[in-house]
Amino acid sequence: MQANDVRVLKGAAIPAAAAGAVATAVAAVPAGVPGALGAAIGLAVVAVFFTVGLVAVSYASRVSPAVMMVTAVTTYAVKVLVIMAMLKAFEDATAFEPVAFGWSAIVCTVVWTAGEMRGFVKTKMLYVDPGAPSPGQGDR
């Protein structure tokens, strides 16, 4: 991973961890330990999924922009499908509170995404190559 990617990861993971801690405490009030456990599992799922996605996109960016885009879209689709499957599989769970899991996953996903967006904006990465010749400006 490049230094910019690590900064983006930190900028997303730290606020998401804080939001997950708050969600865990809030879920513990009405549902007790099962609520706190459900919220903590939601935070863990979001942290693992988004970290794996960011690492995959980081490595794909070294290949080409096209591979990076395909990787980003693919990891996003897989994350959505797996989280939906987990929500469905856990809807009748008794070891933890599935509602707390779902709300924690939603809140942590929103916070993580906002942290990533803020991190990418602050890195000020160029999205064009300033030294590349312009199309149509060939030698005459």
Image (cartoon, grey):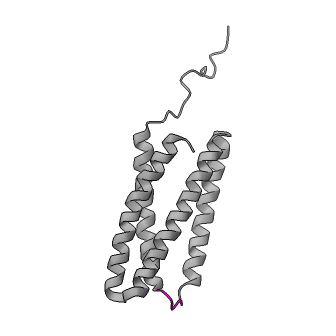
Residue 112 falls in image quadrant: bottom left
* Residue ranking furthest to the top: 140
Q: Magenta region's main secondary structure?
A: loop
Q: Is residue 125 above or below residue 100?
A: above
Q: Is residue 133 left or right of residue 112?
A: right
Q: Is residue 98 left or right of residue 32?
A: right
At 57% from the left edge and 21% from the top edge, which residue is drawn?
131
At 53% from the left edge and 89% from the top edge, which residue is drawn?
93
Image coordinates of residue 101 in percent, x first then y, are 46, 78
Image coordinates of residue 108 in percent, x first then y, are 43, 66
Q: Is residue 99 above or below residue 4?
A: below
Image coordinates of residue 7 in percent, x first then y, are 45, 46
Q: Nearer the viewer, residue 130 or 20?
A: 20
Residue range corresponding to the magenta coloring: 92-96
68 part of magenta stretch: no
Q: Quadrant of the C terminus?
A: top right
Q: Quadrant of the N terminus?
A: top right
Q: Is residue 45 left or right of residue 114?
A: right
